[in-house]
Amino acid sequence: EPLKEEERLYIPSEIQILFELAGFREVEVFGCAPGRFEGQPLQIDDVEMMVVGTAA
């Protein structure tokens, strides 16, 4: 059976709103490189972003 994959891309403001709607507070979005999650400011050429929030 063929492998099926679905992917959804989000812009930072969109993912922040989704986290807030899910009940998270103090949501922050950081840039990161694959496998390196250091909490750096998000840059236009980052291929991944890390979202950190506090559960309500």
Image (cartoon, helix red, strand yellow):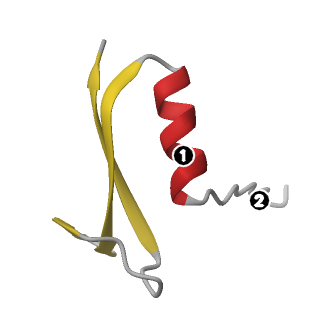
Secondary structure under the numbered disc 2 in the rendered image = loop
Q: Position of residue 38 (x, y in %)?
A: 14, 66
Which residue occupies 51% across, 20% down?
22
- How many circles with numbers are drawn on the protein? 2
Q: Going by the image, does 20 lie left or right of 55?
A: right
Q: Position of residue 54 (x, y in %)?
A: 25, 26
Quadrant of the frame with the C terminus: top left
Which residue occupies 33% across, 69% down?
31
Which residue occupies 29% across, 18% down?
55
Does 53 appear above or below 3?
above
- Residue at the farthest top position: 56
For label 1, the residue is: 15
Secondary structure under the numbered disc 1 in the rendered image = helix
For label 2, the residue is: 3
Q: Earlier in the sequence, mark 1 or mark 2?
A: 2
> What amino acid is labelled 2 in the image?
Leu
Which residue occupies 70% across, 55% down?
8
Does 25 appear above or below 15?
above
**Mark 1, residues whose alpha carbon is within 10 Å: few (<14), some, or many (≥20)?**
some
